[in-house]
Amino acid sequence: MLRHMPESPGRHVKLFMNGRNQAVRIPREFELPGQDAVMRKEGHRLIIEPAPPRSLLAVLSTLQAIDEDFADVSDLPIDSVDL
């Protein structure tokens, strides 16, 4: 869910080249949380928003496989349950 923050007055910033990419230094008062952001264009506007948190599945998919042998675990007997 996106919260709408009150608009702050615009601030003039300088554009510069970082390698072959155009870049802008984001002033501290506009700093975004986290390490990632989502950028999109709406007409002539460039919108930059904090990236949504990654799902657990996305985080787990970045982990390397474990090459260890684990001991076999036998299944425990099933207890009957009265419903």
Image (tube, rainbow, N blue to C red):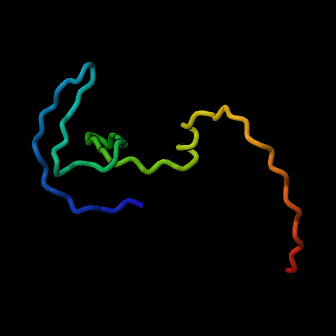
Q: In this view, does 57 lie above or below 80?
A: above
Q: Nearer the viewer, residue 59 or 28?
A: 59
* Residue drawn at x 27%, y 24% as measured from the top left: 21
Point out the residue furthest to the bottom here: 83
- Where's residue 8, x and y in %? 16, 57
- Residue closest to the eye, 60 or 54: 60
Furthest-front residue in this view: 71
Q: Considering only vertical position in the picture, is 28 above or below 22?
A: below
Rendered position, 77 above or below 54: below
Q: In which quarter of the image is the C terminus?
A: bottom right
Residue 27: x and y, percent? Answer: 16, 44
Q: In which quarter of the image is residue 19?
A: top left
| Above or below: residue 79 compared with residue 65 | below
Q: Quadrant of the N terminus?
A: bottom left
Q: Residue 7's spot in the image, x, y percent?
A: 20, 58
Depth check, front residue: 19 or 43: 19
Residue occupying image coordinates x 32% and y 43%: 42
What count of labels does the image hold? 0
| Front residue (pair 26, 13) | 26
Q: Residue at x 16, y 51 (%)?
A: 29
Dividing the picture into quarters, in which one does residue 62 lie? Answer: top right
Q: Position of residue 6 (x, y in %)?
A: 22, 62
